[in-house]
Image (spheres, helix red, strand yellow):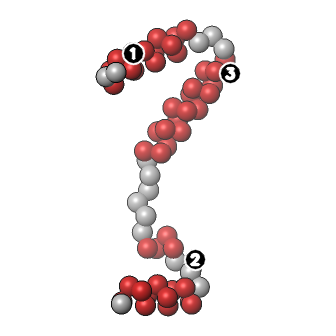
Amino acid sequence: MFTKARKIQLLEEVLKVSNEATLIELETILNNSKKKKEKKTMSAYNFSGLWSRKDAALIEKAINS
């Protein structure tokens, strides 16, 4: 089924919902999907202080070999 048709079908089903708890769950799902799209870009600075000196030496050795 095409994306547009699926959206219309979902909207029709949502319009039939009368249970408040179900509406809250639907809102939560939609809000969570928006958050997933707004991912932060990872940087090496995010890992600063997480590695021990031994781990850092092993990683540096692996990178340089």
Label 2 crowd (10 A; few <14 / some 14-19 / many >=20): few
Specify the quadrant that holds the C terminus.
bottom left
Which numbered disc, 2 or 1, marks the residue closer to the eye? 1
Label 1 crowd (10 A; few <14 / some 14-19 / many >=20): few
| Residue 50, disc | 2
Q: Look at the numbered discs 1 and 3 and tell me whether their residues touch, using CB distance below 8 Å.
A: no
Vertical side of 60 occupied by 31: above or below:
above
Residue designated by label 3: 21
Identify the residue at horizontal 43%, vertical 47% (top origin): 38
**Quarter of the image where one finds residue 40:** bottom left
Residue designated by label 1: 8
Q: Secondary structure at mark 1?
A: helix
Which numbered disc, 1 or 3, marks the residue closer to the eye? 1
Disc 1 marks a residue whose amino acid type is Ile
**Residue 9 at x, y = what percent?**
42, 15
Q: Look at the numbered discs 2 and 1 and tell me whether their residues touch, using CB distance below 8 Å.
A: no
Give the CA distance from mark 2 to mark 1. Answer: 47 Å
**Residue 39 at x, y = what percent?**
44, 52
